[in-house]
Image (cartoon, rainbow, N blue to C red):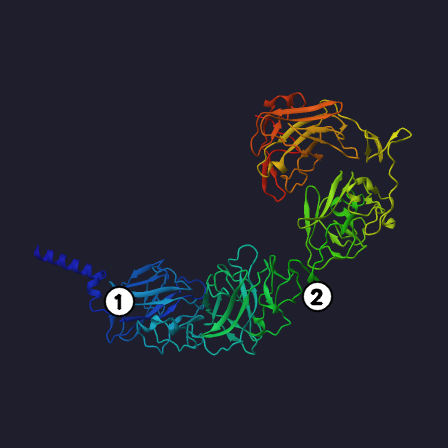
Amino acid sequence: MTTRIGWIGLGCLALIACGPPPASDVCKGRLVGDLVVTEVMLDPAGTDTGGEWFEIYNTLGTDVDLKGMVIFTRDTDGSGAKSHVVKAGTAKAQSYFTFGDIRSGPLPTWIGYTYADALGSFGNARGVVGIKCGATVFDEMTWTRAAKADQSRALNPTVPKTATENDDETKWCDTPANAATTYSGTSAGTPGAANAACSQTIGNCTGRSVGDLVVTEIMLDPGGTDTGLEWFEIYNPLGTAIDLGGMEIFTRDTDGTGAKSHVIGQGTINAQSYFTLGDVRSGPLPAWIGYSYADALGSFGNARGVVGIKCGATVVDQATWSRAAKSDRSRMLDPTIAKTSAENDDEANWCDTQGGTVYSGTSAGTPGAENAVCLAEATTGTCVEDGGVRQIRAAGTGDLIITEIMANPALATATTGEWFEVLATKDVDLNDLTVATPTAATLLKRTECIAATAGEYVLFARSADSFINGSLPAPKLTYSLTLADTQSRLYLRRGDAGIDEAAYNNASNGSSWQLDSNQLNDVANNDPLNFCLASTQFNAAAGSDFGTPGASNQACPARPDAGTDGGVPDAGDPNSCFDVGAAAFRPIVKPVAGDFVVTEFMADPSAVTDAVGEWFEVLVKADADFNGLQMSGNSGLATVSSANCVRYDAGTLVLFANNANPTINGNIAPLVGTFGFALANTNAKIVLFTDAGTVDQVTWTSVSAGKSKQLDVNKQDSVQNDVLTNFCDGDGGIVLVDGGLGDKGTPGTANHACP
């Protein structure tokens, strides 16, 4: 029995011996620096898995048993920590020992022990690896410079192998790739053996002079987010290639703040060639990027900054910018300027790449290639002429007069065949003009100077292609605005300043409205009766429409005199109006009770003030004219006055507002007329009437701010709109001219059924 127990006891001792010995036994007598990290393979070729390793050196004169010691790794910020307890292994006296992450199969000859997947993958750009025993860290090595692919990071063999010396990252280098250092495939390193001589240590770049490399192009503000898309380009003016490994790239603000830098892991720029460094964060490098510095430089300042490259203490070159970048266009050194570090110091020698020079998507630039030719480029208030830049000669009120309008072409579609003509009364530029209708506007931005000389008839067209625009002569400018076929207005503005406006009647298919050649001024074109339909074709051989685009107008027929001619009403008769369709005067058809019905009103707008944003809507129930219609609120009066017959078909919804400008009235357009009286929020009314009596009336006791009151779509007559409960708050969203969301209502469109 005793023998048996003893045997069992011995068996237990044997089992205990099979596991790691207690830390106190393993670590007894061990000191910092007994073992020193001397080499690390951070970025093996292909996948890192199974190919990473690190090497330690035993500085002692006796062997060191590694069993029970802990190897570890982490990021430099302390995150991602991993560790592994060594199960076996001996570091011979004053010899090297290599730990590797071999996942399967026998160990290669250069690996002394595998930790399998316990440490994960080392960071290529930064990290820490080390070995400790209990609380004693023998040694750890830190790197903050990106690894070169397939080349180990090695302690300079000329440096003492101590735990103090290897703390200095400048005493490390990337193992030179050559036949002597290749240990497997294309991998360069000396695992388990003395390190190879360093050709250039990390951060200790030598042998480069100012101007050996020149910054020639920078993408400061790529389209969309800057992340992953910024880059800068350097040029090698020398007759030999330059190894960029160990050189430092940097950026900062012009005031010195926000400095960031990165030591290039690897890269070669060929003689008299370009090389592009970019902040590619993931995936393969695009064809135009030679090296990625990932997020090391952050984002360049769009308005100002510095970027450069240096070798040790020598700033080889840097470029400074203080002018804001243009989105999605690189900033480049003029290719006609010598590519030197002195010439690129002058910001006047740089330009923004022209928009047509695209290398990816909509991004303009020439990364890794010869820069595009710099062209003169306009800034705010300037334009380009004959290769130079000059101030725009801005037009003022009356300097441009709208003289002809084609709103309904017959030979072409409206989107390609509409046009209008302007007479210049002085020498001006057409740059930065805004063309507008009551419902929309378009800005005419051009880089080149678009000059108009005094006396010139200038043609503006939807399309410059004569094949699709109705055989028009060449227009000076094109625009994207749609002209209304019905009576409307056309405006010319520059910024907030009005230049001219013209009123025109319903368009006639295939004929332009042209201003009487005897009344070519900015007052006469406000009256549509001073326009007449063109009677000659501008290109008869092509069967064109009628008009004189880009040429002088014809004289219009004389307008009728006051009163009547042989009993036929004319312009002098207050009870007549000019019927544009019939091209003749006729008696006004006055509405009677119920012909016009108030169906919606906004008494308390929120998106704009009451003074400019009140409006109401009228449903036409029977054919009648609005001419002479009067309207009132609790106080005040307004009358529809027009020489032309103002008639809408039955079923049409028309609008009246206290301001005609849709950019400030909440985008209420088009209008039949405006009124000057206020719509009260409580106990108020709207009355429509003629000299023959009341046409319609609505009353209300209160309204909701920012919401119209609209008559139930199923109860739209002059009897049911007398019942207040037949109205409800408008629920449709009104879109403002600038695209923003305005008040609630359905002005000019069908109402909804009330709850």
Specify the label residue 198 is tagged with: none
Q: Which residue is mark 2?
A: 387
Q: Position of residue 315 (x, y in %)?
A: 49, 73
Name the one closer to the observer, 347 or 547. 347
Q: Which residue is mark 1?
A: 66
Q: Is residue 541 visible?
A: yes
Instruction: Evaluate if marks 2 and 1 touch, with contact meaning CB atoms under 8 Å apart.
Output: no
For label 2, the crowd category at 10 Å Cα-Cα, with few meaning under 14, some 14 to 19 and many 20 or more, is: few
Query: The N terminus lies in which quarter of the figure?
Result: bottom left
- Under mark 2, the amino acid is Gly
Image side of residue 531 versus residue 442, left or right:
right
| Sequence order check, earlier mark of 2 and 1 | 1
Q: Quadrant of residue 55?
A: bottom left
Q: Position of residue 711 (x, y in %)?
A: 63, 26
Image side of residue 476 versus residue 687, left or right:
right
At mark 2, the secondary structure is loop
| Residue 307, above or below 11 | below
